[in-house]
Image (cartoon, coloured by chain):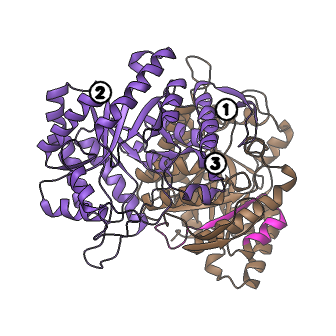
Chain colours: A brown, B purple
Amino acid sequence: MELGVYSFGSREISATTGQPVSSAQAMRDMLEGIKLAEQVGLDYFGVGEHHKPGMPASSPATMIAAAAAVTERIRLGSSIVVLGGDDPVRVFQQFATADAISNGRVEITAGRGAAVEPFTLFGHDLQDYDELFAEKFDLLDQLNRNEVITWRGTFRPSLHDAEIVPRPEQARIPLWVATGGNPTSILRAARHRARLFLSVFGSRPDAFARMADLYRQASAQSGTPAVDTRIGVASVGLISHRPDAVDYWGSFFTGSTGEANGSPIPQHVYDQQVLPGGGFFVGNPEQIAERIVDAHTHIGHDRQIFGSDFGGLPHRDFLRNIELLGTEVKPLVDRELGVSE
Amino acid sequence: MELGVYSFGSREISATTGQPVSSAQAMRDMLEGIKLAEQVGLDYFGVGEHHKPGMPASSPATMIAAAAAVTERIRLGSSIVVLGGDDPVRVFQQFATADAISNGRVEITAGRGAAVEPFTLFGHDLQDYDELFAEKFDLLDQLNRNEVITWRGTFRPSLHDAEIVPRPEQARIPLWVATGGNPTSILRAARHRARLFLSVFGSRPDAFARMADLYRQASAQSGTPAVDTRIGVASVGLISHRPDAVDYWGSFFTGSTGEANGSPIPQHVYDQQVLPGGGFFVGNPEQIAERIVDAHTHIGHDRQIFGSDFGGLPHRDFLRNIELLGTEVKPLVDRELGVSE
């Protein structure tokens, strides 16, 4: 199984000033994390899109292009791009450029989005939340499949025999639909023969077994080869031998310390979620490996990625978490489940 | 004076197939050119925006971010971004991300654009050509100056106490207004205390002396410090010791060979333009250096950049042109005009 990391860009709390580092420094910190992820043998790094000061990665393709230029093997993608708030033509051009630079290692994971900022910022009506995504994902899929395109829709101008450049290095950029488990999104992924990324934030992995089944059945009915029906899982998780790092990280989610967390989780819920079978993957490498293997028995997924740099987590803990995932967790998971091809 | 290169992405004609290389290969070729430009000591590389198969660089910031990750000293920017067809918020986010990665070496040169594709493709009315640019450049300028912004305009949704992230590494990203010499654009640059990039495609440099004067006078009246009133010049030019490369390149502009050129120049005009005092900088390093110094006596500009990879120019000639500009032309110009700081 493939293992990887995702990040929305994190502003470490400076030990000297007590303030978050600059958002520009956060971008360089993320790039350092991506390089390390490749060095320790991880399979994927996903760059998120948010538009708030605490999560300053607002342009996934820009960061991915930078990472593409300084890596050689790791696959790079969005986790996620909020497609409803953007123009699929621009998104495709940016990711195709990054794919060219990477020599064919770029993917796009698109979702409807979990935050309102992109809709406010780019002037879209949240009432059109699902229609925006449906139309734009359809266009993105068509752009990916066709060098010349004629298209008409509701939310952007028509295209007439348009040849969108550059073309990616890959014949097609792998497309994933991200969802927290919404059946509409799952069936949409299957209908487009796209891959499926399940975001397991705060949910038990076993709850996703039925979603995975729904996707696989619908994909089979749409005639998609089994080899193309890939499932990814995105979880929050921190791998560490150091209890203080784990405590610091956990306190962000329960709202007791760290940068302001608008939606804290009650302590007793958090305590449940970090146990085996829960949605928060927190612990030492052996514990994390065991939980990944356990989740895999329920979901049968092909890739799992972890987000850890929340709440001003010290950058060294973010890096150490990546290192442990690659050097200690991955060999344990490979031994149980076989090496990812 | 600073010297540099610009490119719209060029698809070399493959010697084996007789066909242009892929647009993805063109992106990698450009990145190789940028790395070489840094190695040979050039000051700037500008990435253009076009939306046609023969010029496949459609997303300047994406390419600039990749280049930022693999260079350390050269300044990187757009030449140009067609701002009227884009959203200044997205453009600022992308360039700020690239600026962070570059540790503060990114610039934005924005123009109204010389091609209709961006307007067709992104659904803007060419009747709004100037208004689109005026409003969007104003917003870009404000985003660049303010961490939190409230803004209202005609062509994009309002912003209310919006904190656009990430912030760039530089306190402000240097902004340039590009123009072929239109007084409206020149006065706009001065009013915004922006820099001015004159595109001298097919015009005599001495014709630009008055434009430079207009900009300097208007800038002085707006209270801009003289040190900030910088002028750049973008020319087409090929530096080569090889007559066959020069002939090949010239034949593109006159429409006699190479990839289809929609607006060929009559041979007698081309022959005039390549002479000293003309707008096409073609020749060996000594000739080019002499012409740059001569143009400088008229314009007094701070930076000159050259575009050469047109018409399927062989990639090795593009690279050789960059190498000669850095290793032979630049020392000659420095000797005459002083070393750029």
Q: Residue at x 25, y 65 (%)?
A: B251
- Distance from Cα at disc 2 to Cα at disc 3: 45 Å
Q: Chain of mark 1?
A: A
- Distance from Cα at disc 3 to Cα at disc 1: 14 Å
The magenta span reads: A168-189
Residue A338 as seen in the image, left or right of residue A307:
left
- Distance from Cα at disc 1 to Cα at disc 2: 42 Å
Residue B257 as seen in the image, left or right of residue B25:
left
Circle 1 residue: A53
Tell me the SS state at disc 2. Answer: loop
Q: Is residue A230 above or below residue B319?
A: below
Query: Which is nearer the eye, B285 or B326?
Result: B285
Circle 2 residue: B300
Query: Which is nearer the eye, B207 or B132?
Result: B207
Circle 3 residue: A48
Question: Are discs 2 and 3 located on one and the same chain?
Answer: no
Q: Is residue A256 above or below residue A237?
A: above
Q: Chain of mark 2?
A: B
- Across and down, in percent, residue B204 comes to 29, 42
* Amino acid identity at mark 2: Gly
- Across and down, in percent, residue A26 comes to 55, 34
Circle 2 residues within 10 Å: few <14, some 14–19, many ≥20: some
